[in-house]
Amino acid sequence: PDEELEDNPNQSDLIEQAAEMLYGLIHARYILTNRGIAQMVGRGRCPRPQPVPRPGLSDIPGEAMVKLYCPKCMDVYTPKSSRHHHTDGAYFGTGFPHMLFMVHPEYRPKRPANQFVPRLYGFKIHPMAYQLQLQAASNFKSPVKTIR
């Protein structure tokens, strides 16, 4: 069998890719266990000083790279480290941050007492206002300038 792999390097590459994917998918399941969660706690940082768990945006390999999730900001960030730019998000799974906070609720940050509320001339801006404005802008066609 080793002789066949030496004769066909493409098959060797295919086996290596499949092994990497299998390892990554096993990793996604392992980090949901108590031991995995214990090893993952405290890894990553938000631009604000907040611990950040790593989620994938998809459980399907090859769809998205790993991201950072900040539970305080409630946002997903692209990691600054270049080593994460080539790490498949499926290897962390979409459920890891949520499992972490179910097992360790003390890590979930408290909601701020005074949250910023966008206002214009003293009136609160309804969240749908931005969507309606985007729709209106996409429907608006700028007039065609004629060249004389």
Image (spheres, rainbow, N blue to C red):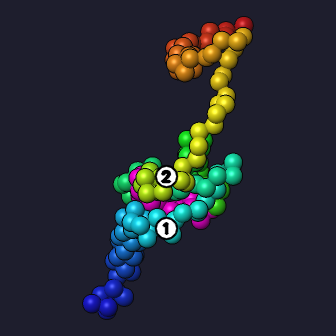
Q: Which of the image's four quarters has the N terminus?
A: bottom left
Amino acid type, residue under disc 2 in the picture: Pro
Mark 1–mark 2 distance (CA, rounded to whole Å)? 13 Å
Amino acid type, residue under disc 1 in the picture: Ala
Count of numbered tags: 2
User: Can residue 103 be seen by looking at this rendering?
Assistant: yes
Residue 119 figure quarter: top right
Q: Which residues are magenta?
A: 82-96
Name the residue nearer the viewer: 101 or 58.
101
> Furthest residue to the left?
1
Which residue occupies 61% across, 59% down? 44
Taking 81 as reference, is 143 above or below it? above
- Where's residue 124, x and y in %? 63, 16
Q: Where residue 105 is drawn, which disc sits there? A: 2
From the viewer's perspective, tell me whether residue 58 is left or right of residue 48.
left
The residue identified by callout 1 is 38
- Where's residue 76, x and y in %? 55, 46
In this rendering, the label closer to the viewer, 1 or 2: 2
Please check the rendered image and state whether residue 134 is part of the magenta-colored stretch, yes or no: no
- Where's residue 127, x and y in %? 55, 21
- Where's residue 69, x and y in %? 55, 49
Taking 14 as reference, is 111 above or below it? above
Helix, strand, or loop for circle 2? helix
Neighbour tally class for label 1: few under 14, some 14-19, many 20 plus, Cα within 10 Å: some
Task: Return the disc, 1 or 2, that comes first in the chain's sequence.
Answer: 1
Please check the rendered image and state whether residue 92 is part of the magenta-colored stretch, yes or no: yes
